[in-house]
Amino acid sequence: MSVTPCGFTRTPGKGFARLRWAGGWQVDGGPPDLPELHSRRGLEIDWPAAPVPLDGLTDLAGAGIPLTARDAPAWVPGDLAALLTDRDWLAEPADGTARCLADLRREEHSVRLRRLAHRPARATVSIVMSTKRPGLVGAALAQMERQRGVEAEVLLGLHGVAFEQVRAAVEACSLPVKWVEAARTVPFGEVLNRTAALASGDHLAKWDDDDWYGPDHLADLLMARSYAGADVVGTTAEFFYLEPLRATVRRTTFASGAAYPSEVWADHVAGGTILLQRAKFREIGGFPALPRAVDLEFLKAAQKIGARTYRTHGLGYVLRRALTDEHTWQLPLAHFVRIATNQWHGFRPSLLMDPV
């Protein structure tokens, strides 16, 4: 069985099935069929009386199949048992958005199971961030410090900003920080390249100064890169906080109405979430020295050399949108309201953001 959640379905068309042991883990008397299981809400586990191998069960977890059980025998490892018996995700919300929130809770549970099944080796990541807004640097660095499961360094591109304006934030950061200063007239892409040139990590990860990242953001990208065998990985651009409206929106479709899935091979990922090996970054030729559309053109360049891009879940990332001309992605707030699948008042990220 291929242990990848590729093909995960956000809104399942079928209900639960039962997972039983009969000389091997079976669903409805037969071997698990991943495409069929991805369309189900989940699997309820019926435990055998005696200990059995758990490999097939953890394969299902790694494939993103939501698994649950009312209890777990003592021979099931504690971390797995805790996840399987945590049934909060099964509760139906009572605020009039039952289906969409139930689907979101289901996906969060699926991601937690994937993390347990895959557990990628700890890796070194150089986080590349260019900023024109010194007031945002402290909060961005704090989110980088919270990253779990990685060894990170920060590469800071000061775009028309003097180091003295961010010195206090940098000196308060527990991570190693390197920086370059560049005039505002230098194209954004060139600032990123000068910044990335300071990297010593095995991987490069692009970071936007005004967005929110969950503490497992980088580890989830590395996990996806590992199980997919991708050259470039990133997340869906799924959650947006519209600052002037004080509202969070989530999109799961494109403006055309077509599905905008995660866990797929794709030519597009959220620009603030691009991650790849440093050697592959050099092979692609770095970021294009442009003032805008840097992420889009970089992904096109990756495609031209045959690099494969994989889009994983976007539950640990929230894009901020304000009334400003400093966003490199220039779209009006009305656009994000129009494409929203769900809307909530206030800041309402996925629970995987693990806010503190």
Image: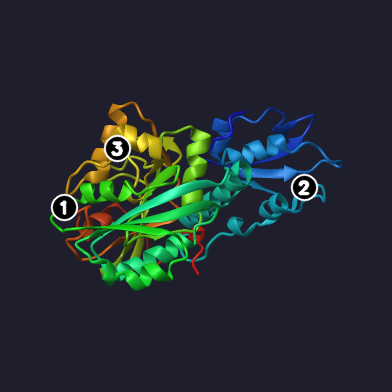
Closer to the eye: label 2 or 1: 1
Q: For the residue carrying disc 3, how many other residues have a C-alpha within 10 Å: few (<14), some (14-19), or many (20+)? A: many
**Whole-percent x, y for residue 159 in the image:** 22, 59
Distance from disc 3 to disc 2, alpha carbons, whole Å, reads 43 Å
Residue under circle 1? 186
Instruction: Please name which of the two marks, 3 or 1, marks the residue nearer to the observer.
Output: 1
> What's the residue at 39%, 52% (across, down)?
127
Check disc 2 and report the residue beneath it. Answer: 76
- Quarter assignment of residue 134: bottom left
Q: With 87 as the anchor, is 266 left or right in this view?
A: left
Q: What's under tag 1, amino acid-wise? A: Val
The residue positioned 45% from the left and 42% from the top of the image is 202
Image x and y of residue 139, in percent: 38, 68
From the viewer's perspective, is 179 left or right of 80?
left
Point 40% across, 64% down: residue: 141
Q: Nearer the viewer, residue 344 or 301?
A: 301
Find residue 299 and name its label. 3
